[in-house]
Amino acid sequence: MLETLLGDDVESSGRYLPELIYGANDGIVTTFAVVAGVAGASLSPGIVIVLGFANLFADGFSMGMSNYLAERSEEDYHDARGESHARTDGKTPVRTAAATFAAFIVAGWAPLFPYVFRVEPLFPVSIAVTAAAFFAVGASRSLVTNRSWLANGVEMFVVGMAAATVAYAVGNLLAGVA
């Protein structure tokens, strides 16, 4: 399918896959962690929007910049040893950072959808949207890999929802402290 869309450029289409998957997964997880933590602590839904968007942009920026610094550090490491580190895939630290940030923002806002558009019941709808986002991002990996879309989708769904469960449990546990 991807071959039809991209022609002969299929191999290079997956070059940013690690950054996109990492950014998207972490965007969904950390934003849902805010949603689940607030819901677990039975706090106001308005807090979800404030904390959710603050997290979305601050953490997304942080991840992008961390990716940039990691890539630059690797280049500097090779330069310090006089080793050639010419990349053959055309990726640069700026592009990997941008890919990570963009994926984080695009996928990470999914858990906030019901809170922004007031789709009731808020938390259950957020769970459903988050689950669908995990599955969709995971399944999309099959466009540039040989793995089945179902296996990829289920894998990311399970990992992501496990992290979401931890966030809810911590919020619920600490509800009495707040």
Image: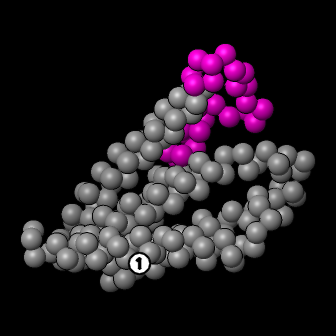
Instruction: Look at mark 1 in the image and give the residue it sits on.
Output: 127
**Would residue 139 appear left or right of 145 to someone viewing this image?**
left
The quarter holding residue 122 reads bottom left
Please name the residue shown 21% across and 63% down the image. 47
Query: Residue 60, position in %: x, y?
Result: 42, 47
Tell me what residue is drawn at x 35 percent, y 73 percent. 166
Q: What is the total number of numbered labels drawn onto the structure image?
A: 1
In the picture, which quadrant includes the C terminus? Answer: bottom left
Q: In this view, does 97 lie to the left or right of 147?
A: left
Image coordinates for residue 125, horizontal then vertical, percent: 40, 80
Q: In this view, does 146 lie above or below 88?
A: below
Please provide percent x and percent y for residue 49.
28, 61
For badge 1, the amino acid type reads: Ile
Residue 49 drawn above or below residue 103? below
Write down the region rendered in magenta: 76-102
Quarter of the figure with residue 61? top left
On whether residue 16 falls in the magenta region, the answer is no
